[in-house]
Image (cartoon, rainbow, N blue to C red):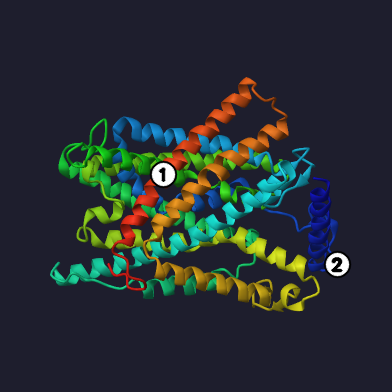
Amino acid sequence: MGDQSASKTHNQVFALSIDVHSAGGGVPSKNLDDDGRFKRTGTVWTASAHIITAVIGSGVLSLAWATAQLGWIAGPAVMFLFSFVTYYTSSLLAACYRSGDPVTGERNYTYVDAVRSNLGGFKVRLCGWVQYLNLFGVAIGYTIASAISMMAIKRSNCFHKSGGKNPCHMNSNPYMIAFGIAEVIFSQIPDFHQLWWLSIVAAVMSFTYSTIGLGLGIAQVAENGKIAGSLTGISIGTVTQTQKIWRSFQALGDIAFAYSYSIILIEIQDTLRSPPSESKTMKKASLISVAVTTIFYMLCGCMGYAAFGDFSPANLLTGFGFYNPFWLLDIANAAIVIHLVGAYQVYCQPLFAFVEKQAAERFPDSKFITKEIKIPIPGFRPYNLNLFRLLWRTVFVITTTVISMLLPFFNDVVGLLGALGFWPLTVYFPVEMYIKQKGIPRWSTRWLCLQTLSMACLIITVAAAAGSIAGVVLDLKSYKPFSTSY
């Protein structure tokens, strides 16, 4: 433990010296925070935008399907339950941003730093592996999801032109490459602190397509003249008894992962200004974001189920067919693509920062890794170009794009990564760090309640992982690399 804390102090002194050095040496102290870095400027609203961008992903569109598996009673109840669990564990995690005193204690810049200063040992490595593997998986999932939305626009226009006579099959690879090119450009935004504007655009887009999905659901219910669905969900007969159980597990998983953003919570918190203390602002941002998210999830999930009943589609926007009103579906799909461009960055920045910090610590004298080249931009501050950042982030985006083209059913694999990441990152580590921080005695009522919560979420994670594995096995039966067409 002593070695770890010594190395952590060394690392932080090192990081501090780099920051002060890069700040230009003579920066007045009023422009610096208590750790010597440039003053953070994030507010409750920028943090909420980051969270909403991360949380309201295109996963909102699968919630009608999830509600259909569980029914009118369990569906909304499970959504509400997960919103509470996510908010509660996020509050526990937000309290771990500073070690010791919540206002003046030492900052933990990343999730892994928080685990290192609170738990230490093997858990630090475990947390790092789970977090970064998850972020890598999300990048691939978003590449695939954006290609599907781009093709939906192209196909709906093709169907409209041919009056439904042309099946309009197309290959997904050019769309994935286009998304990859956009991400190569956006990934040159140096860090989270300069990403706020992209997050706000992405958050607006997520509201746009969720609202369109909701509006179309309401219109469909009005057209049907009745509310579809039942209290217990999809009926036996439409599916077998075994399928019903299996799909219910998968629905639990879908809803659980639709909420989780703990994976990047500490990194978002590190953008906040103080006073008030960062944990207070973060708890407020979490409450706003989770409340907004829950309202949207409830509306989209429930209206989608009311419109389609047992036949609710896996993607709400594709359930309305390619016709009326096709232009509105095009707007919704375009909004999904723009949102995913921003969400990709919000998720990848912690991974980018980790690799760049490790490289700078290992090769402090390398000009290639540490030198910032100032490029003047008329009317703006000069852009700091770093050659290592340019090269490594470009290689990262190319890698995720190629894997997406190779494994186009990766959504199931991402579901599996999400399942494996949900319990440790959203529940287990926040609970364990909170117990350690507050010195909660073993077998006390509070300790038992926290451990029960953790075990219940572990069971859900295992069930959802089993559902994802079944999906991957099914996909592999008809798999041909690099030749996906829809």
Find residue 374 and report its horizontal and vertical position in percent: 71, 77
Q: Is residue 392 above or below residue 358?
A: below
Q: Is residue 156 left or right of residue 465?
A: left
Label 2: few (<14), some (14–19) or many (≥20) C-alpha neighbours in 10 Å:
few
Residue at (27% x, 56% y) in the render:
318
Find residue 348 and report its horizontal and vertical position in percent: 56, 61
Q: Is residue 301 left or right of residue 105?
A: left
Label 1: few (<14), some (14–19) or many (≥20) C-alpha neighbours in 10 Å:
many
Query: Which quadrant holds the N terminus?
Result: top right
Of the pair 124 and 184, the residue shown nearer to us: 124
Q: Is residue 201 left or right of residue 220?
A: right
| Dot 2: element | loop
Amino acid type, callout 2: Gly
Residue at (26% x, 50% y) in the render:
313
Labels 2 and 1 touching (C-beta < 8 A)? no
Q: In the drawing, what numbered circle is on residue 367?
A: none
Q: Name the residue beneath numbered marker 1.
A: 464
In the rendered structure, which disc, 2 or 1, sits on the residue that comes first in sequence? 2
Q: In the drawing, what numbered circle is on residue 25?
A: 2
Q: Is residue 260 above or below residue 172?
A: above
Q: CA distance from mark 2 to mark 1?
A: 52 Å
The quarter of the picture where residue 302 lies is: top left
Find residue 102 and report its horizontal and vertical position in percent: 74, 38
Q: Is residue 217 left or right of residue 238?
A: right
